[in-house]
Image: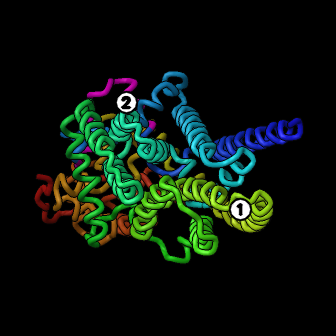
Amino acid sequence: MLENRSIEKLSKALLFGSFILLLCYAVFLQFLAPTLYGVDGYYHIGVTNFIKQFGFNYSFRWCQFSTFGYSFSDKDLLLHIFTLPFCWLSGDLIFAAKCAVILLDLLFLLTITLILKKYLPNFLIPPFLITIFLSPTFSVYFLYLRPATLASILTILGIYFLIKKQHFIVFFISSLYTLTHISFPMMAVFALICEFIRYEYKKEFFLKNVVFVILGIILGTLIHPNFPYNLLSFYLNGILVPFYSFSGKDIDFGRELYSITTKDAFLQNFMVFFTLGLIFWSALISRVKVSFATLVFLGCSSIYFALSFFSNRFWYLLNPLVVILAASFLRDWWETKKDIETIKRRIRFFLVVWAGISMGAGFYCFDSLLNTVNANISQNTHYENAAKWMKDNVPGGETIYHAYWSDSPYFICFNPKNNYLVALDPIYMYYFSPKTYEIYRDLKNGLIKEEAYSYLKYTFGVTYGYTRKSAGFYTTIKGDNRFKIIYEDEYGVVFKLVSEKKGRVPPVAAD
């Protein structure tokens, strides 16, 4: 008995130590860079600061050629509410954003640990926790101030409570999910998967799960402070964007919406493939009696696994689900075997194999992660400097042209006294005016040369602009005396329209 207590204490200490180690790892990486990671974090902390200043209902004037200008809806509302206290505590938006990310990471680690404890003994939880972080895709997304981490937490909890038939908790989670992320309809999909599997497994269909998920989604939609514009936001981001990206429409969506090569998907998410392979091999060889919970996690994971081959962003949500699936399956295997000595021998073998494979995956992950960190620091430092320069040198109220829609989040965050064209996603400009978007896209690609000045001045009504040097538009203005470069570094330039040659003035394209 005394020996068992000592082992249990050691197991708890190991679990606590690994939890703290992963949290410290996240904090270290977060503060390794003086900037935020990614692009969207600047938009999110900027919008959070607007909520602090103006409340939840305000005119989003920062996007002059976007649906945001007349029907803005904060589709990531819960993330901004979550981040808001940090904006009150610190006037440094970067520091506030990093603190919010760390708290998000802590909540994720607590959630995944508590769920794993439902299926595993304490001493086995650390390798399962660490496995999640052996994916470069997951590790990079974990650094972002984005709603995907909140969505992952709600997804994990939602599936678990669907299995447990806790329909009132599921109702609450569905309401929160609707205020968090545009993927909230997935909760209804998961509810249907859960109940169809329950029917096949237990000959029972718990209709309340499905009904309460739908009611939660309806409530979350109705209580949104930007209702009914949140319906338009869902239509644009939740329906049109996937449809247009899959159909190959010529709109410059973010790279995460598209698939990566099979080789890159395999290397960046190796532990997903290894874990799934191990599960199916064990099920086949050992004749494991698979539980209802395992089948539900398998069904839900399969949805994200299939979607990941069409859109890279789903790998982030898939990684923790696969780890929970593996934990649930291991419990099934444990209960099927019932031979303690065989179980101990197989687990020791598993831990040795896992340690060897995870070392290789860990080195690859950390190297890939450091490359991403360095690239983020270089790019985001440039954008922060350009935004601060414009704040000090460009008159307030001016609308500033930017070649890429992903340029503006930095500027909105650090230079809110000026206006811009579009932010967050090109679908908002395309839906606002397809013709205007085509002009905007062609300007960025350098396909419009002689009339570029006139389009900027008369279509977009700007005097100032910014472009990366890698954009085709930079080759358009370089050497053209109608454009005066007033700020420059190795990455991009800020310019001013100074004079116009005689020529045709194009019509205003905006509707």
Residue 129 visible in image: yes
Residues in magenta, as a range? 45-66
Dot 1 or dot 2, earlier in sequence: 2
Q: Residue at x 84, y 40 (%)?
A: 4
The answer to which quarter of the image holds residue 173 is top left
The amino acid sitting under disc 2 is Phe
- In the image, what residue type sits under mark 1? Gly
Instruction: Name the residue located 72 percent from the left edge and 44 percent from the top edge.
Output: 122
Q: Can you say which quadrant of the picture contains the N terminus?
A: top right
Q: How far apart are marks 1 and 2 (CA)?
A: 40 Å
> Relative to residue 465, is residue 111 depicted above or below?
above
Residue 103 among magenta residues: no
Q: Any mark on residue 50, and which?
A: 2
Location of mark 1 (residue): 362
Could you say which is closer to the camera, residue 193 or residue 420? 193
Q: Is residue 309 above or below residue 426?
A: below
Residue 202, quarter of picture:
bottom left
* Figure colour scheme: rainbow
Query: Is 227 left or right of 136, judged from the image as shown?
Result: left
